[in-house]
């Protein structure tokens, strides 16, 4: 997921842009044709997804995540609960991150993967694939990226410093928001066309742009949406009923919600550093979009946890959005070796999370 799952996995809307004083206009960045050509030519043989990798990775992540969740809600001792909860959150975060792949893939190349992902992760975690499909592709549209029409972009680096902690902290409420959306609002909306329109437009997208309104689905997309939303709604209602009747212990549900909050917060932190967030709304060239995005390649190890399923190569993904996640590491190695050191390609790579957080925090303190 791009930010968001890229990215971001919440129903929350990011803080509205602060009123900014005059800034020095940023120079337009022209496309570096040598970089774009090299990236395309060096990776032609890496386009095909490998179903075995996708299924094995997804199933292993789900098994570990739900297994650790079961341990967390049954084991005694705070230390063991916390350890199991951390393992569960990281594994389920990885499983949930496949929503980003689902939004990009040609489903004929990976038959039944979308359905399998929804059954294993999307519905149980109340984040079905329709919340990203039809939304994330707009973020990759050349004329939309970084503009007011981009559902996954806010100029965070140009906003007030307090917006950054607010952006992260509010994501912790995502599990409660999703439970309300599917257990209460979905059923009620069947009786109110006006409410239904509001839910579709405003509460059915993993977006951070508060002005974004998604379109209602049509055709096959509508059929899939209705089917999966019904499943998610029934599951959310079941959670409420089984908790109220004592079948699910309140302690266990609270631990599960805490794990869900952990997943949302980690994703939101990743979203915070997935881009530099320095565009003020003007259309950008592909090279400019790449330089506004972030790679965190090896030798850094921790990005494998906080930016899984290829999200550590987020800038490269914006160059080559059709590459499957398991090909991005090899693609990065090839392109890095082929291009001269003065190529813009190398300027999008960063050492790790602390430096990126420090960079965006400092940006918000720049006098405007």
Image (cartoon, grey):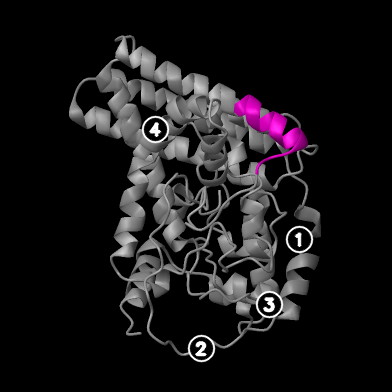
Residue corresponding to mark 1: 43
Other-residue count near label 1 (Cα within 10 Å), few / some / many at <14 / 14–19 / ≥20: some
Residue 333, position in %: x, y? 64, 64
Q: Is residue 220 magenta?
A: yes
Residue 261, position in %: x, y? 35, 39
Report how far apart the C-alphas of labels 1 and 4 lie in the structure: 34 Å
Q: Is any part of residue 111 visible from this angle?
A: yes
**Principal secondary structure, stretch drawn in magenta:** helix
Q: Nearer the viewer, residue 189 or 322?
A: 189
Residue 275, position in %: x, y? 50, 66
Task: Tell me which segment is drawn in magenta.
Answer: 216-228
Q: Mark 3: which secondary structure?
A: loop
Other-residue count near label 3 (Cα within 10 Å), few / some / many at <14 / 14–19 / ≥20: some
Badge 2 vs badge 4, beta-carbon distance below 8 Å: no
Image quadrant in which you'd find residue 28: bottom right
Give the mark nearest the N terminus, 3 or 1: 1
Residue 66's place in the image compared with 100, above or below, is above
Q: Is 57 placed left or right of 14 in the picture?
A: right
Give the mark nearest the N terminus, 2 or 4: 2
Residue corresponding to mark 4: 88
Q: Is residue 186 magenta?
A: no
Which numbered circle lies on residue 25?
Answer: 2
Q: Is any part of residue 110 visible from this angle?
A: no
Give the mark nearest the N terminus, 4 or 3: 4
Q: Is 367 placed left or right of 356 in the picture?
A: left
Which numbered circle lies on residue 339?
Answer: 3
């Amino acid at each position: 997921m791009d930010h968001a799952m890229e990215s971001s996995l919440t129903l929350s809307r990011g803080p509205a842009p602060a009123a900014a004083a005059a800034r020095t206009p940023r120079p337009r960045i022209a496309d570096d044709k040598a970089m774009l050509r090299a990236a395309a030519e060096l990776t032609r043989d890496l386009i095909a997804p490998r179903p075995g990798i996708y299924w094995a990775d997804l199933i292993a992540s789900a098994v570990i995540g739900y297994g650790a969740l079961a341990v967390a809600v049954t084991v005694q001792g705070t230390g063991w609960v916390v350890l199991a909860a951390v393992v569960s959150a990281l594994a389920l975060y990885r499983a949930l991150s496949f929503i980003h792949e689902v939004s990009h893939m040609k489903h004929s190349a990976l038959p039944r993967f979308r359905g399998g992902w929804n059954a294993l992760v999307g519905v149980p975690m109340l984040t079905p694939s329709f919340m990203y499909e039809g939304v994330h592709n707009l973020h990759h549209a050349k004329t939309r990226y970084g503009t007011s029409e981009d559902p996954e972009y806010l100029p965070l680096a140009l906003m007030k410093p307090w917006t950054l902690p607010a952006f992260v902290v509010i994501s912790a409420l995502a599990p409660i928001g999703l439970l309300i959306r599917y257990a209460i609002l979905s059923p009620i909306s069947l009786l109110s066309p006006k409410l239904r329109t509001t839910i579709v437009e405003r509460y059915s997208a993993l977006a951070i742009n508060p002005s974004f309104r998604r379109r209602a689905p049509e055709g096959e997309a509508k059929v899939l949406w209705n089917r999966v939303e019904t499943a998610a709604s029934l599951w959310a209602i079941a959670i409420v009923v089984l908790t109220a009747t004592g079948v699910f212990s309140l302690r266990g549900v609270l631990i599960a919600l805490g794990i869900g909050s952990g997943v949302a917060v980690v994703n939101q932190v990743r979203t915070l550093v997935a881009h530099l967030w320095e565009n003020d709304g003007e259309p950008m060239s592909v090279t400019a979009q790449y330089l506004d995005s972030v790679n965190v390649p090896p030798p850094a190890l921790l990005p494998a946890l906080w930016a899984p399923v290829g999200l550590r190569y987020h800038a490269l993904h914006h160059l080559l959005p059709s590459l499957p996640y398991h090909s991005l590491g090899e693609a990065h190695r090839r392109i890095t070796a082929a291009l001269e050191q003065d190529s813009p390609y190398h300027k999008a790579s960063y050492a790790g999370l602390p430096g990126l957080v420090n960079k965006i925090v400092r940006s918000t303190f720049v006098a405007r």
